Amino acid sequence: MLGKLLKHEWKVVWKVPMLLIGILMIMAMVAGFTFVLPVWGSEWVGLPLSGMMLIMLFYFSMIAVSVGITIYFAVRYYKNMFTDEGYLTHTLPVSARQLLLNKVITMSAWNLISLIAVGLSLVLFAGITLWALTPKDSSFAREVIETFAELMEEWPELIRSPYMRGFTGFCVSILFMILAGSFSGTMMVIGSISLGQMVRKHRILGAIGAYFAINTVVQMVNMIIIFPVMFGFENTMSRWDMDVSPFPVFTRFYGILTAVTLAVAVGLYFLSEYLIRRQLELE
């Protein structure tokens, strides 16, 4: 039954996030192509200012996509679970766990997709900008290709050097942190809304207050746990040379962050499930 819920949820929600992502990609292309147009050398200050404004709009679009998708799913979760729509939602022949997992999986997936989209928009903007600013003669292009080929040839030897020790683990730790962050971001929203509905007359304010309270506590815990790791990193950097690799320290740093993030997210999940099962009161 969970599969059917996910299939239905995906069909219903995909249009708004994809629209936001599409606008972001368009803004990335527009901002990049400002470097193709002869606006930056214009004597009239309005043209360079217009180009700068387009680049700033692209920057704000990256923020708006992540925030907009989060707000969209937060509002949808609140309406589906705790308003009049909830009377229909909770009459479905599924358990509270399946209802919650449906929301968590969908929101986490779109959090990850929005993060990837922001990264791709940066690559698109940078690629168009470099294409616009680099000389178009064949010799330059040949030099770039030769330099890239040399780097690829030297990469196996570089990765085996003492300085690169632990680089693979570092990359894996970043990947896990990104995945954990997508799940944690979802549970921060869902947990806050689930706690906020306990404030019967001011549910939205309660949800906002719970979000900031949870975020503050998580930041404090992170700081307490991370300080020893930072001291270790400082000691490593004080002995800086090409025979000492900083990657194991970074890996430990991101590993601790991931563990704390997952612990908080799992705790919020079980708290939300309990509140939906035992303390549910619809508007």
Image: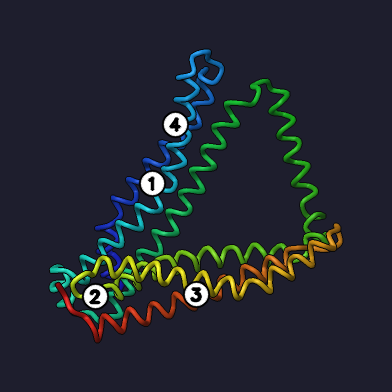
Please report whichever mark, 4 or 3, sits nearer to the chain's N-terminal start: 4
The furthest residue to the top: 43
Please determine whether, in this image, residue 218 is positioned above or below residue 25.
below
Please name the amino acid that badge 2 sits on. Val
Q: Provide the residue designation for mark 2.
A: 199
Q: How far apart are marks 4 and 3 (CA)?
A: 38 Å
Counting other residues with Cα less than 10 Å from the Cα at mark 4, is it few (<14), some (14-19), or many (20 or more)? Answer: some
Mark toward the viewer: 3 or 1 = 3
Along the line of sight, the residue nearer the viewer: 69 or 124: 69
Along the line of sight, the residue nearer the viewer: 147 or 244: 244
Say which mark, if any, is on residue 21: 1
Q: Provide the residue designation for mark 3.
A: 262
Q: Name the residue at 60% across, 63% down.
A: 174
Please report whichever mark, 2 or 1, sits nearer to the chain's N-terminal start: 1
Residue 217 in percent (x, y) is at 47, 73
Task: Determine the secondary structure under disc 1.
Answer: helix
Q: Quadrant of residue 90?
A: bottom left
Q: Distance between the residues labelled 2 and 1?
A: 34 Å
Task: Determine the secondary structure under disc 4.
Answer: helix
Q: Provide the residue designation for mark 4.
A: 54
Counting other residues with Cα less than 10 Å from the Cα at mark 1, is it few (<14), some (14-19), or many (20 or more)? Answer: many
Task: Determine the secondary structure under disc 3.
Answer: helix
Q: Distance between the residues labelled 3 and 1?
A: 27 Å
Please name the amino acid that badge 4 sits on. Leu
Say which mark, if any, is on residue 81: none
Task: Determine the secondary structure under disc 2.
Answer: loop
Please name the amino acid that badge 1 sits on. Ile
Mark toward the viewer: 4 or 1 = 4
Q: Quadrant of the N terminus?
A: bottom left
